[in-house]
Amino acid sequence: QVLSLNKGKDAHNGYQSLLAEINDPNSKYILRTANRLYGEKTFEFLSSFIDSSQQFYHAGLEQTDFMHAWEDSRKQINGWVEERTEGKIQNLLAEGILSSLTRLVLVNAIYFKGSWEKQFNKERTAEMPFQINK
């Protein structure tokens, strides 16, 4: 099934519905999304932006001190992501990626645990370097 949306508002509402469906606690699998905004605590973000982020994307705003403690903020973000993904995603943000100039970080991670309809055959798999083709 394809998600077809025509307008900006439809996109927000469609994503909201999708989040509700995939985070259903009664499903036979675990598919958890982790969405959060981390904003510099000295900045004032529009309340309409914060409200929309929470309503449509379940991404609340966590205030943090990027200006003086960007490395502590990075560790806090990484810890939250690791917790939300059952330890599968560690160190999402590499050292040095944040600085005193960082004002807003949008975090989005997905955790899935379930049984595949067609399982992978371990004998037909091999570890190889991950490459992105442009």
Image (cartoon, rainbow, N blue to C red):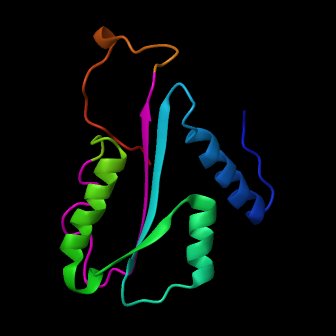
Q: Nearer the viewer, residue 44 or 27?
A: 27
Residue 69 in percent (x, y) is at: 20, 80
Residue 96 in percent (x, y) is at: 20, 69
Q: How many marks?
A: 0
**102 w.r.t. 122: above or below:** below
Q: Quadrant of residue 27?
A: top right
**Can you name the residue that lies furthest to the front here?**
26
**Residues rendered magenta in the picture:** 90-114
Residue at the location (51% across, 63% down)?
A: 59
**33 w.r.t. 9: above or below:** above
Quadrant in the picture for the N terminus? top right
Q: Main secondary structure of the magenta part?
A: loop
Does residue 94 appear to the left or right of 108 in the view shown?
Answer: left
Does residue 123 appear to the left or right of 25 in the view shown?
Answer: left
Residue 128 in percent (x, y) is at: 25, 29
Residue 75 in percent (x, y) is at: 22, 64
Residue at the location (33% across, 40% down)?
A: 131
Q: Quadrant of residue 74?
A: bottom left
| 11 part of magenta stretch | no
Does residue 31 appear to the left or right of 88 in the view shown?
Answer: right
| 97 part of magenta stretch | yes
Q: Nearer the viewer, residue 24 or 14?
A: 24
Q: Nearer the viewer, residue 67 or 101?
A: 67
